[in-house]
Image (tube, rainbow, N blue to C red):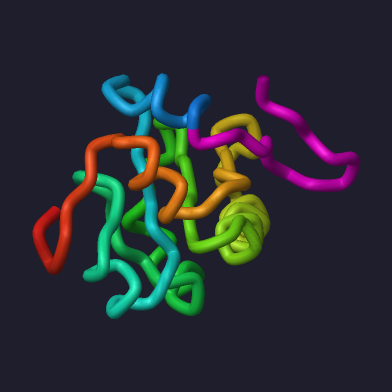
Amino acid sequence: MPTQVPGEPYQRISVDEASKMYDSSDTVFIDVRREDEYNNGHIKDALLIPVDDILSRIGELPEDKKLIFICAAGVRSGLACEMSAAMGINSSLLYSITEGTDTWIEKGNPTSYGSEK
């Protein structure tokens, strides 16, 4: 079940919760790791927007879909959620996967490698 820590403008979810949202047309996954990390394995069809680029690329994020951010361990994805909220994206649409991409892959969820989406 998604949880929200007081003061955080987003909800924290597990890989299992995120995988249930994967096929939804109102959901976009965003990988906020570096490109080399992304190329080593990422959620299939996830957008690559490194956390350092979130502010300059905020216009690439749809404002009418749930935005699910993932990184290696949940720190950068939480930061990306906070940045997105600060830039005006509705906080009810922001999610951070608390487990990292390795857990996503280990659980057999849809994964791509290299620059393949």
- The part of the image, by quadrant, that contains residue 21 is top left
The location of residue 54, given as percent across then percent down, is: 47, 68
Direction from residue 8 to residue 104 in the image, left or right: left
Q: Toward which corner of the image does residue 89 lie, by quadrant? A: top right
Magenta-drawn stretch, dominant element (helix, strand or loop): loop
**Residue at position x 51%, y 54% from top?**
100
| Residue depicted at x 42% and y 55% | 102
Horizontal side, residue 59 vs residue 91: left or right? left
20 with respect to 46 (left or right): right
Residue 18, magenta (yes or no): no
Residue 11 occupies quadrant: top right
Residue 27 lies, with reference to residue 117, above or below; the image says above
Q: Residue at x 32, y 56 (%)?
A: 60
In terms of depth relative to the viewer, which is nearer, 52 or 97?
97
Q: How many marks?
A: 0
Viewport quadrant of the N terminus: top right
The residue lying at 48 percent from left, 49 percent from top is 69
Residue 11, magenta (yes or no): yes
Which residue extends farthest right?
A: 6
Q: Residue furthest front?
A: 106
Q: Position of residue 77 (x, y in %)?
A: 56, 57
Query: What range of the chain is rendered magenta?
Result: 1-15
Work out which residue is located at the far left of the displayed protein and give it.
116
Which of the pair 96/89 is nearer the observer?
A: 96
- Above or below: residue 46 compared with residue 31: above
Q: Where in the figure is residue 7, as x and y percent of width and height?
A: 87, 46
Where 20 sits versus 95, above or below? above
| Residue 2 coordinates in the image, percent (x, y) | 67, 26
Q: Is residue 82 left or right of residue 104?
A: right
